[in-house]
Image (tube, rainbow, N blue to C red):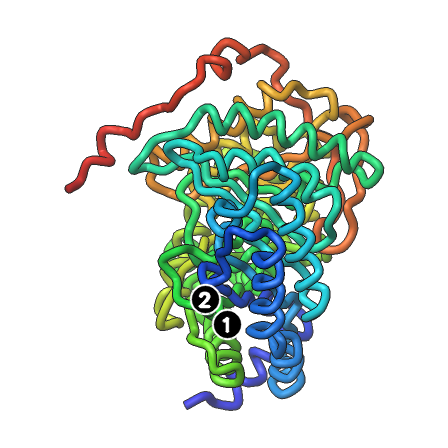
Amino acid sequence: MINLHEVIETNKMIQQENLDVRTITLGISLMDCVDPDLTELNRKIYDKITRVAKDLVSTGDKIQREYGIPIVNKRISVTPIALVGAAACKSPEDYVTIAKTLDKAADTVGVNFIGGYSALVSKSMTTGDELLIKSIPQALSQTVRVCSSVNVGSTKTGIDMNAVKLLGEIILETAELTKDRDSIGCAKLVVFCNAPDDNPFMAGAFHGVTEGDAVINVGVSGPGVVKKALEGIRGEDFETLCETIKKTAFKITRVGQLVAQEASKLMNIPFGIVDLSLAPTPAIGDSVAEILEEIGLEYAGAPGTTAALALLNDQVKKGGVMASSYVGGLSGAFIPVSEDQGMINAVEAGALTLEKLEAMTCVCSVGLDMIAIPGDTKATTISGIIADEMAIGMINQKTTAVRIIPVIGKTIGERVEFGGLLGHAPIMPVNRFSCDAFINRGGRIPAPIHSFKN
C-alpha cells in the first residue's frame, strides 16, 4: 500500500525537484502500409498514424490532470521508413514526400516529434537505405517534427564504414540546409550502434520490426530528484551513496510505470517498456552534471568523472529495474551538452572536452549527444568521431550514439541557441588532425571476436 508519506514525497519531487515523465511515445508499425505506389503509400501512412494516435495527446493530458504528474512530451515512433518506402521510392525526393507525410500526421494529432525516418545498416546498405540516408538533409530541412536515425553498427555485425563515411557528409549537408536556424536539423539526427527497438526518446526513437502493431513506451526523468537526495548524504561512504541512488531511481521509475499502465488502459494499446534514463533539461536543478558534482567532483570532466558516471548509471538501473515489469530503451544517464546546464558550465570552465565526453560514453546511456562543433569541420572528421563512438558500442556490447551539430558560420568560443528542451551550447573544439585515409578505405569493420556466442 502507498502511505501518506510516500504521496507527500512524490508531490515534493514533482513540485520542487523537476520530476516529470519526459515522454509518452506511441510506437506504430507501418508494415501494413507498404505499397509500390508512392501516392497510395503516403495516404496509408497518414491514415494509420492519425487513426491509431488520435487520442494520444488527450490521454496524456488526462493522466496529467488526474495524477498531477507533468508529462512533458507526447511522441510517435514508426517502423524505419527505409523499409516502409523501399518498394515505392526510386529517389531521395520520393522519400522526402514520406517525411512530409509524417510531419503532417504529427501535426494533425498534436505530438511534439515523430521518429522513425530511419535506416538500419549495421552490415551494409540496400538501395532503399542509401536513398533514405541521402534524403535526410532535405527531409529535416523541410519538416518540423520529423526525427531521423541511422544504425551503422552492432556487436554482431561490425560497423558499416561506407555508411559512416556517407553520414559525415550528410550531417554537414543537413547543417548547411538549416544554417539559418543554427544548423538545428542536425539536432534531429542520431547515428547509432546497437540501437534498441523500443527507445522512446528522440531523436533516436523508431518502432522496431520485432515490435507489435502498436505499443506504449514511457521515458521518465528525474536528475533533480537524485541530486536533492544526494545533498542529504554529503560526506557519506560509497555504500550509502549507492543505496540512496537506487532507492531514488526506484521511486522515479514507479511514477513512469503508473503513467505507462494508465495510458495503456485508456488507449487500449499494450504497454511496452519504461525507459528509466535520467534525461536532463536546461532548467536549473535538472542536470546530470550537477549530480556528478554532488558525488564529489568540482566539475564534470574532472578526474574521477568516468567512475562517478559509471556508479550513477549502474545504481539507476539497479533501482529502476525493480520498479517496473518491463525496463527497456536506453535506461541510465544521458550526458547531452546543450540540454544540461551543468555540462555547459563544465565546457565553459575548460573542465570538459570532446575527448573526455567520449570516455564518459563508455559507461553512460548513449553517447556523444547534442555537441556543437565549428561549422568548418570536415566531413571525414565527423565520420571519424562517429567511427570512434560506434567502436565503443560494438566492443562493449552497449548502445552508443552520436548527435553532433556542425554550426555553419560559428567557431570555437561562440555559443548557439537552440531553444526549448534543446537548450544552448558552446562551440567545442575538434581535433584537427586528419583521418581522411582511414575513412576513405571503404568497406566494413568486422564484428569483434566476442560476438560469436552461438
Residue 142 placement (x, y as % from top left): 75, 45
Work out whether residue 219 or residue 317 is closer to the camera in this orientation and state it.
Answer: 219
Q: Amino acid at mark 1?
A: Gly
- Report which quarter residue 307 is drawn in: top left
Instruction: Give the residue at mark 2.
Output: 274
Q: Is residue 307 visible?
A: no
Instruction: Give the residue at mark 1.
Output: 256
Residue 359 placement (x, y as % from top left): 48, 32
Mark 1 lies on a secondary structure that is helix
- Res. 49 mark: none
Q: Quadrant of the C terminus?
A: top left
Most extreme residue toward the right, as rendered? 180
Q: Quadrant of the N terminus?
A: bottom left
CA gap, disc 2 and disc 1: 6 Å
- Report which quarter residue 71 is drawn in: bottom right
Q: Amino acid at mark 2?
A: Val
Residue 225 placement (x, y as % from top left): 58, 65
